[in-house]
Image (cartoon, rainbow, N blue to C red):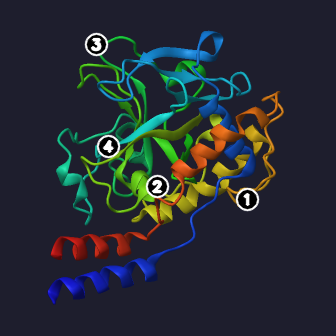
Amino acid sequence: MRHRSVLVAITATLFACHITAKNVPSALKAFYNKAGSGGDCTGADALRTGFYNTEWSGGQTTYCTKYLPTGKGFYLKGPGSDLANMDIDCDGEQGSGDVRCKSSRDTQGQTRWGLRHLEKYGVRDLNANIHPYVVLGNEGSYSPTFDLRTVGVEPLSIVAVVCGDELVYGVWGDTNGDDNEHPMVGEASLALATACYGPSISGNRGHDESDVLYIAFAGKEAVPAGARWDADSYEAFEESITAQGDKLVAKLFGDKSTTASASDPQHTTSSSNGDSDSDNDEEDSKRNRKSSGRRTNIPRLCQIILIVCIALA
């Protein structure tokens, strides 16, 4: 009887808390499909190669500029049709009512950029439970390494993330250190991962499929001007950077609509993309089916209620 009542509570929470997620603009969706179906990233398109999406992936992930205008940014690209996965980072300020980071086995008390840049805003550091930050760049005693600043990407600048067939904005908040055997990529804060894939995400449970697109923007215009670094929820912080993120996406991909349905048949590509996507329709369809229906964007309070309900069950 107790289990039945808990299940009823979970169902009610999901129903009451569901809100419509941000759809991927049509031109960005076209780029997502094109990047995934475009094969390996090599030659002049590869800023730096030899990174690992997982410990056993073979070091074939690249900081890639393929199909992007020169000097405007990059994305993570794996071999073949792979992009990147999403492991969970819980570094930084630990104060929060969300207990899911406690399962992380390698949490550190500070992030690469939050500690240095946020004091003037009255914030001790980035908080993985609140700030949707992305881990990009590689530092340490291993090889290869990569510093995003060498290609014009500023600390704490906005990063566009296409995950679960939705668009989420984060910031470049941390770097990949040398605490693993190989130079790793594909990691984001708990807050960002939850926005992508819901409250089942935890400190040691991320998203394993290599279908996540991370786009870092070069230039000072990508540094968030009105970010609420002192926000007490993911929703409040995300709202404070969304308008600027929308402008960056529209400028890079030439799409004025940031609320276009992901199923919009008008796949308008950036003028820099050149050739047509018609040859990739079958691959695009596969990727769309693969990424659809996996997430619901749930407000933070509702996430906590849902986690408690699941624990009681």
In the picture, which quadrant includes the C terminus?
A: bottom left
Q: Which residue is mark 4?
A: 89
> How would you rate the neighbour count of disc 3 (Cα within 10 Å): few for under 14, some for 14-19, many for 20 or more?
few
> How would you rate the neighbour count of disc 2 (Cα within 10 Å): few for under 14, some for 14-19, many for 20 or more?
many
Look at 40% across and 29% down and name the residue there.
185
Q: Helix or strand or loop: what does disc 1 sit on? A: loop
Question: Which amino acid, by three-letter code, is at mark 2?
Answer: Cys
Which of 72 and 121 lies nearest the eye of the viewer?
72
Please indicate whether residue 112 sits to the left or right of residue 310 in the image.
right
Q: Helix or strand or loop: what does disc 3 sit on? A: loop
The first of marks 2 and 1 along the sequence is: 2
* Alpha carbon distance from label 2 to label 3: 32 Å
Q: Nearer the viewer, mark 4 or mark 2?
A: 2
Q: Which residue is mark 1?
A: 260
* Alpha carbon distance from label 4 to label 2: 14 Å
Which of 179 and 162 lies nearest the eye of the viewer?
162
* Alpha carbon distance from label 2 to label 1: 18 Å
* Alpha carbon distance from label 1 to label 4: 30 Å
Numbered circle sitting on residue 196: 2
The first of marks 4 and 2 along the sequence is: 4
Q: Nearer the viewer, mark 2 or mark 3?
A: 2
Q: Is residue 75 depicted above or below 167 in this figure?
A: above
The first of marks 1 and 3 along the sequence is: 3
Question: Which amino acid, by three-letter code, is at mark 3?
Answer: Ser
Question: Which amino acid, by three-letter code, is at mark 1?
Answer: Ala
Which of 135 and 37 lies nearest the eye of the viewer?
37
Q: Helix or strand or loop: what does disc 4 sit on? A: strand
Badge 4 vs badge 2, beta-carbon distance below 8 Å? no
Q: Which residue is mark 3?
A: 141
